[in-house]
Amino acid sequence: MPAECQSWSSIAADNFPYPEGVSAQRVSDELSTMLVSPDPEVRDHHAYTATARWMGEGRLDEVLEDLGDTAVERLTHPGIQARTFAPLVLRCVLARAATEPGILGTGSAERWWAAFATWYPAERDTRGWDDSLGWLHAVAHGADAAAAFAQALPARRVEALELCARRMTAPTDYRYVQFEDARLARAVCRILMAPGLTAEQATGWLSVVSRAFADGGAGAVPPWAFNSIATLQSLHLHLTRGLAEGGVPPHAAAVAESAVAVLKLPYNWLA
């Protein structure tokens, strides 16, 4: 796979028709191999695009759990491109499972959450883009996965919000330049969309950020502080305008006010 008369370039050019007559296991094995490739054409434009398309169509349902397990294993892969594309696969698996209740084994999402929650704030290579490897986007891809986990595991929503806060405040040499702040803000809004959160739960995660600033000390603004400020500014915009799908989350005004309270630490001239 692909067939001898085909190539991945031709499959892509034809808008990724599923290779009829090929077992889901064989397709999954090949895609999994390609998803660790350092070649962005192979990994991103071919393997990930095909994975997302065919998973959404239900073509890979019989190997869905295996794909999730493989993605989790790759969170500790030595290649940064393998680690950062793993949460994208997890997001796709969880999104498919949301449309087909019972398709995953009991406890699968919880098991994956534990591994993801360990990896996400600890990943040290947070570059959005590499001229050789292409898109990496640990922060953005992880944010997408965090929102998917919050939907799949409602009891983890508060933890998912805190996880996003721990990611944005984690020590790093990298400043967000590839819209990571917006992706984090969108993920937070999606998590806040779920019904049942109290105002205290919706705003409590911001204490992680305020504590980080309180412990930051004087001197030049470190990258993590810049990243946090940029994310809170983006979040304020998202909370004000809402999402195209879903609108404004409950407690948006309270979260926005709490975000401004943190922003007043560096921006002490705000009214």
Image (cartoon, rainbow, N blue to C red):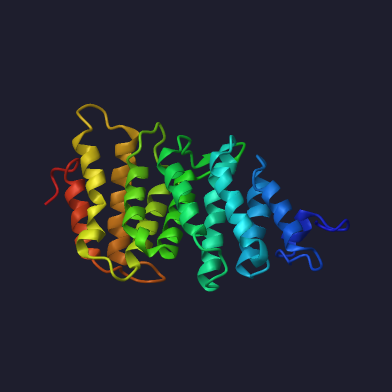
Q: Can residue 135 be seen from the camera position used here?
A: no
Quick one: 247 or 104, which is closer to the camera? 104
Q: Position of residue 180 (x, y in %)?
A: 42, 48
Residue 207 is left or right of residue 152, and the answer is: left
Q: Position of residue 168 (x, y in %)?
A: 35, 43
Residue occupying the point 46% across, 42% down:
119
Q: Can residue 93 be seen from the camera position used here?
A: yes
Residue 271 is left or right of residue 258, and the answer is: left
Q: Position of residue 45 (x, y in %)?
A: 65, 53
- Give the quadrant of the N terminus: bottom right
- Residue 206, placed above or below residue 24: above
- Residue 127, placed above or below residue 187: above
Residue occupying the point 85% across, 58% down:
3
Q: Quadrant of residue 9?
A: bottom right
Q: Position of residue 77 (x, y in %)?
A: 58, 38
Residue occupying the point 30% across, 68% down:
249
Quick one: 243 or 142, which is closer to the camera? 142
Residue occupying the point 29% across, 62% down:
239
- Residue 33, placed above or below residue 89: above
